[in-house]
Image (tube, rainbow, N blue to C red):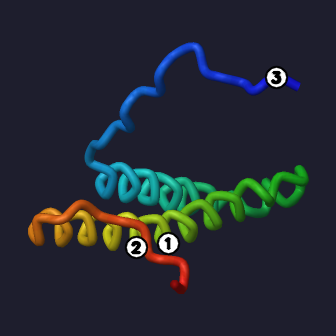
């Protein structure tokens, strides 16, 4: 089997307001959850109660995402302040 080589060079990753994006998405999930909550009986009668719980799960996972990207952003800023590029952790050597 021949080794696969890409035809084009991969683009640089985009950096943007990651914390704001994840926070906004998390807020949207919680708003959708709260908007559907008064109609839970209707959703349950039509076998669509999972829609409500999906929105709650999206909001909960979004909170984890906000925590993660805030820590990542702080680590990048600390590394930039130290003048060193972030590096991988050595594998127990």
Element under disc 3: loop
Tell me which residue sits at (44%, 52%) in the image. Answer: 25
Q: Is residue 71 left or right of residue 91?
A: left
- Which residue, given by chain and number where applicable, does mark 2 sit on? 67
Disc 2 element = helix
Mark nearer the N terminus (3 vs 2): 3
In the drawing, what numbered circle is on residue 64?
1
* Location of residue 89 with respect to 30 vertically, above or below: below
Q: Is residue 50 above or below residue 10?
A: below
Q: Is residue 83 left or right of residue 44?
A: left
Q: Earlier in the sequence, mark 1 or mark 3?
A: 3
Quarter where residue 61 is shown: bottom right
Near mark 1 (Cα within 10 A), the count class, few <14, some 14-19 or many ≥20, is few
Q: CA distance from mark 2 to mark 1?
A: 5 Å
Residue at figure coordinates x 84%, y 60% from the top left: 44
Dots 2, 1 in contact, CB < 8 A: yes
Of circles 1 and 3, the one toward us is 3
Q: Residue furthest top?
A: 7
For marks 3 and 2, give the one nearer the viewer: 3
Residue 2 % position (x, y): 81, 22
In this rendering, the answer to whether 79 lies above or below 21 is below
- 3D distance between C-alphas at marks 3 and 2: 43 Å
x and y percentages locating residue 21 in the rendered image? 35, 49
Residue 76: assigned label: none
Q: Which mark is residue 2?
A: 3
Q: Give me the C-alpha separation between circle 1 and circle 3.
A: 41 Å
Q: Is residue 40 left or right of residue 90?
A: right
Most foreground residue, 23 or 10 = 10
Residue at point 62%, 56% (across, down): 36
């Amino acid at each position: 089997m021949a080794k696969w080589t890409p035809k084009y060079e991969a683009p640089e990753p985009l950096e943007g307001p990651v914390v704001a994006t994840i926070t906004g998405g998390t807020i949207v999930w919680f708003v959708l959850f709260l908007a559907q909550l008064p109609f839970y009986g209707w959703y349950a009668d039509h076998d669509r109660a999972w829609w409500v719980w999906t929105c709650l799960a999206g909001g909960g996972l979004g909170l984890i995402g906000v925590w993660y990207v805030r820590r990542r952003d702080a680590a990048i800023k600390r590394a930039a302040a130290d003048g060193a590029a972030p590096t991988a952790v050595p594998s127990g050597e």
